[in-house]
Image: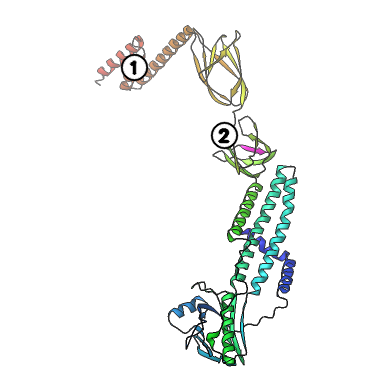
Amino acid sequence: MGTFLTALASTVEMSGTAFVALIVVISILRGSRNKYVGSSSYVLDSFSLNPAATGEDPFIQISGRHQGLISWLMTLLGMETRIDLTVGAREWVLRSGSFAGMLTTSVPLGHVEETVCGYQRSLMALFFTVFFSLNCLWTGLVSLVPLVQILSADSESAREHFSAMLSTNLEMLLVWLALAFIAGAVYYFSKRIAFAVSHQHVSGFVFKRSFIGGHVVDLAQMEEAAFLLNRLVRAAYYEEPGVNIPQFTPKDPTERSPLLRWWMLLGGYAVLGLFAFLLGDYGSGVSLAIHTVPPNTTVWFDNGYAGQTDSSGSLLVQHITREHHALRYQAAGYQQLDQAFTGGTFESEHRVDAHLSLMRYPVKLYTTPGGVSVSLDGQQVGTSNSTGFLLMPSVERGRHQLSASLNGYTTVDSNIDVVYPRSWQVVLVSNAEAARQQEAARQAEAANGLNQVRALFRAGKYQDAVNQCDAVLKADPANQAALALKKQIEQTRRILGQ
């Protein structure tokens, strides 16, 4: 639609074409002095010639109707919208009917002054046919410029630019060709044939082919009718018998084949349209479909900002040239990635995938004692030296599970967050010391429990105190202090009758 509007808009710029077309049409029509019947055009329904007619039989019979679909429907209903011509041995009878009425004109053949036979076509359609054809020629000449530039371009971007320009010109050329074809078809099918006689006034009609009924009469058949009419007029004027009228002989009966068949025109039009489409597709460049992991990655295209991938990691860059290009990806917490690619010659979309790696930082680990075996995320990474130092030079950004172990010592498991270079201190405890600390912790916990029992006992909460004693004894059944305190609480409850 945009190309069609562009073609119409260019008409204003091609006003000179309209002037040239007008001159061409005037030159074609120069000297033409055809005489036609001044009446409305009718549509042919039937046409018959009978040169050997005898008696009252007609030599010529022609019938038609007013043009238009409504008139055709009215004719089917039997309403008077017809015109009928009958030419006998002595008389020309023309009967015409319409919604307004009916008229019959009879002219004796002996009083006919002249006969009229000819055809005419739409001058307006001829003008537009010439006008659109000249625009086709002009657009074709203009298209040679980008074609030469495509052949001489030294870069892919220049070739794509001129290919798009040539595609636009060819699309305009296709529009002009279509319009020229339509105008030419209108000019061809606008042919109207006149047939009349003159006696003080002209009596006859003009008719054209019927697209609904399919009735067609060419000029050769009408010339045969005119030849027969002239012989009948001569016979009536000189009172000669009509049966002596000779047969009509065409001047040039040889049928000439057109230089271009219709399928050649359609085939050429289709090839031109395909060529314009391919050039337009080539000139529009390549669409670059980018997919990144992780999403929300910033993308730079040939050192220019291209955009950021969406939540699914996708980004579409339109209209890139089929050359070598460079991409750069940047995302927080990930290493920068540089990527190069080349757009394919015959592809309209190119896909690239980019998987960015997490940033890596050095992590320094200090263990007490030395010689500790260290694992990261279940993978052995090394053993600290005698001073307890271990360097992990490249650890991915994020949370990791660190495990440190040494024979005779308890294993230490912990989570570390690596978001920058950092140091980490790990202290391992011997098994004996761990047991001592565990026992000390147990005793401290039991002492704390007994203090709670005593506080509940003093507060008179004997049942709660008994429950707390049971908890201490469960952890340390041999705790004598807990046993004695529980016995004391039970005796007090018995004295109080609880």
**Residue at screen point 36% across, 11% down:** 481
Residue 418 placement (x, y as % from top left): 58, 24
474 and 181: which one is in front? 181
- The residue labelled by disc 2 is 294
Range shown magenta: 296-302
* x and y percentages locating residue 167 in the rendered image: 66, 52
Of 4 and 206, which appears nearest the observer?
206
Between residue 474 and residue 273, name the one nearer to us: 273
Looking at the image, residue 389 lies above or below residue 154:
above
Residue 236 higher or lower than 474, as above or below: below
| Location of residue 281 in the rendering, given as x and y in whole percent from the top left corner | 63, 48
Q: Residue at x 58, y 75 (%)?
A: 220
Give residue 390's quadrant in the image: top right
Q: Which mark is residue 327?
A: none
The relative height of residue 48 versus residue 358 in the rendered view (above or below) is below
Residue under the point 70% across and 75% down: 29
Distance between the Cα atoms at labels 1 and 2?
Answer: 58 Å
* Quarter-of-image position of residue 205: bottom right
Q: Quadrant of the N terminus?
A: bottom right
Q: Give amino acid for label 1.
A: Cys
Give the quadrant of residue 136.
bottom right
- Label 1 vs label 2, nearer the camera: 2
Residue 40 makes an appearance in the image: no
Whether the magenta-drawn stretch holds residue 278 is answered as: no
**Farthest residue, direction front:** 244
Give the left or right position of residue 295, taking residue 127 as reference: left
Q: Which residue position is annotated with label 1?
A: 469
